[in-house]
Structures are given as structure tokens and as C-alpha cells.
Image (spheres, rainbow, N blue to C red):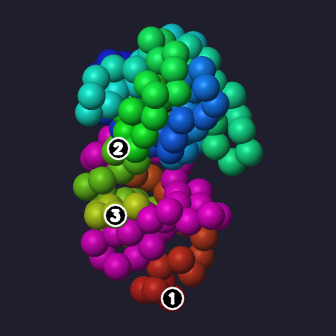
Amino acid sequence: MSATERPTLEVGRIIKAQGLKGQVLVDFWTDRVTERIAPGTELITERGLLIVKAGAKHQQRYIVSFEGTTTREQAEALRGLVLSAPGLDDDDAIWIDELFNAQVYDQDGVLRGKVIEVEENPASDILILDSGFLVPLAFVKEVEANTRIDIEAPKGLFEDEN
């Protein structure tokens, strides 16, 4: 699936103006910030397209300049806007939108349930299955988008094992 076919994902929010030359402070919600702040990147907002001119890490957030935004007043007018972008094309990545409604099978081919939710967790995001089982994303071996997920589960992960 190409980036243009991928769904649009929320990737961050503009917090406030930063400085006097039209820069803004952005809180990104993605682990792919480098791609999102690369010059020429297009970010979608409810007010239209913003094109990144430059970006750099600043403490826990990022300072970003957009084409056509050159004053503090223009930057301040962007405060609070949610930034969205198409998903990136990366065959090695597991995308959250590809997990929902997929049937989860363990290494023995046993169906363990269907993904109904994905919960953020510092160690590894967790697949929540309709069967009540919780499966760390770290155990996922293969994903067929929204259809099937194969996992390598350690003994004892599932309550019904003997």
C-alpha cells in the first residue's frame, strides 16, 4: 500500500508560537518525527495544508517553521491545530489501523480472538482481543491488514493453557 493510499493519521498538535519569526512549538504523537518535520512535508489541518520549511527538536517538543508563516501573529493563529498526514509507506512497520478486526492466531494455529482495541503501554503496546486476552505487540510476527495476525506467544500467556 502506498503512502497516498494510507489513511490520514493525526501526528501532532501546534502548542503555541515560538519566537518572532513565525515558528511554532509542536507536540508530536508519532515515533516518525524525522519524516514529519523534513522540509517540504505536507501536514493537513482543519484550516488547510501546511508545508514544513524546517524543524528541530526543542526539549520534549519540536520547533517548526511553515512556508508562508513569517510573523509571530501568523504563528499564533495556528495555535491548537491538530496536524495530520498520510501514513508512511514502510513494509517493516506495523500500523495501528491494520490491527483492528484482525483474527489473532498463535504459533500453533489456534485462534485467540479478534483485535478490538490497541492500548498504549511503555514496554509494548497491547492488543486487546474480544476474547478478553491481552497480547503485547512485541509478540506479533506477521500482519495481514485487518484480517490476520500471527503471534509467537510464550507459554502461559493464555489462561486456558494447561
Disc 3 from disc 2: Cα separation = 11 Å
Give the quadrant of residue 68. Answer: top left
* 54 with respect to 99 (left or right): right
| Residue nearer the viewer, 40 or 17 | 17
Give the number of the mark in front: 2 or 1: 2
Residue 28 location (% of width, % of height)? 54, 42
Is residue 78 found left or right of 130 in the rendered image?
A: right
Residue at (26% x, 33% y) in the render: 46
Real-space CA distance between mark 1 and mark 3, rounded to the nearest whole angstrom = 27 Å
Rendering coords of residue 66 (x, y %): 50, 19
Residue matched to label 3: 117
Q: Which residues are magenta?
A: 119-148
Q: Residue at x 28, y 23 (%)?
A: 48
Left-right relation of 25 to 12:
right
Instruction: Return the residue nearer the eye: 50 or 78.
Output: 78
Q: Pointer 3 and pointer 2: residues touching (CB < 8 Å)?
A: no
Q: Secondary structure at mark 3?
A: strand
Type of amino acid at the residue the image marks with label 2: Glu
Q: How many marks?
A: 3
Q: Is residue 97 magenta?
A: no
Q: Mark 1 or mark 3, which has the lower sequence index?
A: 3
- Discs 1, 3 touching: Cβ within 8 Å: no
Q: Few, some or many C-alpha atoms within 10 Å of disc 2 (few <14, some 14-19, many ≥20)?
A: some
**Left or right of residue 34, residue 77 in this image:** left
The label shown at residue 162 is 1
Residue under label 2: 98
